[in-house]
Amino acid sequence: MEILVTFIILIFSAIVHEVSHGLMAERLGDDTAREEGRITLNPIPHIDPFGSILLPVLLLAAHSPIIFGAAKPVPVNFGNLRKPKSGMALVSLAGPLSNFAMAALFAVVIKLGLANAVAYPILLQAILINLVLGTFNLVPIPPLDGSKILAALGSDRFMAQILSMERYGFILVLVFLYLGWLNYLLVPVIAWFGQIFGLRFF
């Protein structure tokens, strides 16, 4: 049951992440996600066989201390944005920010005393999962959101170089995770969040 709850929270959080990208893109001038039916919380259009199912299942089976996954990326045509460069940064930032916002919302529910003995550990798990998703996606490795934010801050040539690395993205992400570098980012983020809301996660 615990694995199922974790899986449901993970998928829901990943879907909200992707929908947030689509909503921001739509607000800035690109309605590609809307046209392709991706502005929805219905999980079916968002399910990615590897990122949504296989990856989290493998991590759960391996008793990994970090559980995460991904929904199918929402299609965005950055060329349609009114300001393509800054728009790319805002669209990319919208996903991680949605995860941090959900983590804060769940923390507020706990702090207001609205969580009973059953809901409390579930909400803590939801907070952790969203902190992981938000932090991980801000890492500036293609094709993660952080790489597009970084690319938008540089010259056009720099942006082209960063985006061209997406073909090697899967390998780069695996190396990053294998070396355990994500932990160096997550530990301070989780500790900082816990201090703000007075929560203990471990």
Image (cartoon, rainbow, N blue to C red):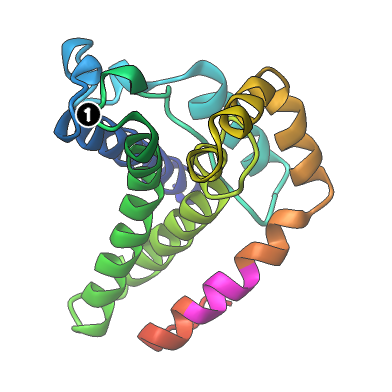
Q: Residue furthest top?
A: 36
Please indicate whether residue 5 sits to the left or right of residue 164 in the image: left
Per the image, the residue denoted by label 1 is 82
Please indicate whether residue 94 sits to the left or right of residue 184 in the image: left
Residue 153, above or below 186: above
Residue 10 in the image: x percent, y percent?
43, 43
Q: Is residue 127 visible?
A: yes
Residue at 42 percent of width and 24 percent of height: 73
Q: Residue furthest right?
A: 179
Q: Is residue 190 magenta?
A: yes
Secondary element under disc 1, as helix, strand or loop, is loop
Residue at 81 percent of width and 44 percent of height: 178
Q: Which residues are magenta?
A: 187-192
Q: Could you say which is closer to the camera, residue 76 or residue 50?
A: 76
Q: Could you say which is closer to the camera, residue 30 or residue 130?
A: 30
Q: Is residue 75 visible?
A: no
What is the quadrant of the C terminus in the image?
bottom right
- Residue 154, located in which quarter of the rendered image? top right
Residue 202, above or below 40: below
Residue 59, above or below 104: above
For badge 1, the amino acid type reads: Arg
Residue 111 in the image: x percent, y percent?
26, 83
What's the magenta bit mostly, secondary-structure-wise?
A: helix
